[in-house]
Image (spheres, grey):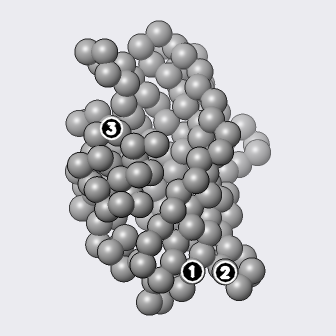
Amino acid sequence: MRYCRGIDRLDFDLVRGAYHPDGVDHHTGFDGGVEEFIAWVRPKLALFGGTMHTIGNHLVELHGDRAISESYFAATHWGHPDFGDFTSGSRYVDLMERREGRWAITERWAVREWTRSDEGRMITPEAAGPRGRRDGTDPLAELQSRLAAR
């Protein structure tokens, strides 16, 4: 929720605070550390009139001081000079860790399921970036396998 508020309000200290300092983000068109993510996303968000992230289903699986968190969300974007207005249905698949009593994101996959323009047409997803899959290779299944192997 801190992350969503930070993105929607362009409060990048709040975004930063959702991650541990060595946190990694896998977004459409981006893979890297939290500081690099902020440098990448800041100018992109500045082109929009606004964004609104709405969180729906949320499930957490605890594994001691680690957790897998899956949150469904819809992200509405408006006022972009090239793309206009659109909404994406996605999931955040997060590896969370508790360090010194503080839970934060260690690794995040922003898994895009679909994107639709305000005119109602589906927008072809970008080639790069996490995508939802139903064949056991979804980022959630891969993260669950990784933690089960430890």
Instruction: Judge whether residue 33 can be spotted in this image.
Output: no
Query: In terms of depth relative to the viewer, which is nearer, 122 or 11?
Result: 11
Q: Residue furthest bottom?
A: 81
Q: Which is more N-terminal, label 3 or label 2?
A: 3
Q: Which is more N-terminal, label 1 or label 2?
A: 1
For badge 1, the amino acid type reads Asp
Nearer to us: label 3 or label 1: 1
Which residue, given by chain and number where applicable, does mark 2 sit on? 118
For badge 2, the amino acid type reads Asp
For badge 3, the amino acid type reads Tyr
Q: Is residue 140 above or below residue 11?
A: above
Q: Secondary structure at mark 3?
A: strand
Total marks shown come to 3
Residue 108 pos. (x, y %): 45, 42
- Residue drawn at x 62%, y 58% as measured from the top left: 74
Which residue, given by chain and number where applicable, does mark 1 sit on? 85
Quarter of the rendering containing residue 141 = top right
Q: Is residue 28 above or below residue 66?
A: below
Q: Is residue 21 above or below residue 113?
A: above
Residue 147 pos. (x, y %): 52, 20
Q: Is residue 49 above or below residue 8?
A: below
- Which of the labelled discs sits on residue 146, or is there none? none
Q: Which is more N-terminal, label 1 or label 3?
A: 3
- Residue drawn at x 36%, y 60% as measured from the top left: 9
Residue 88 pos. (x, y %): 62, 64
- Which of the labelled discs sits on residue 19, or is there none? 3
Residue 48 pos. (x, y %): 41, 77
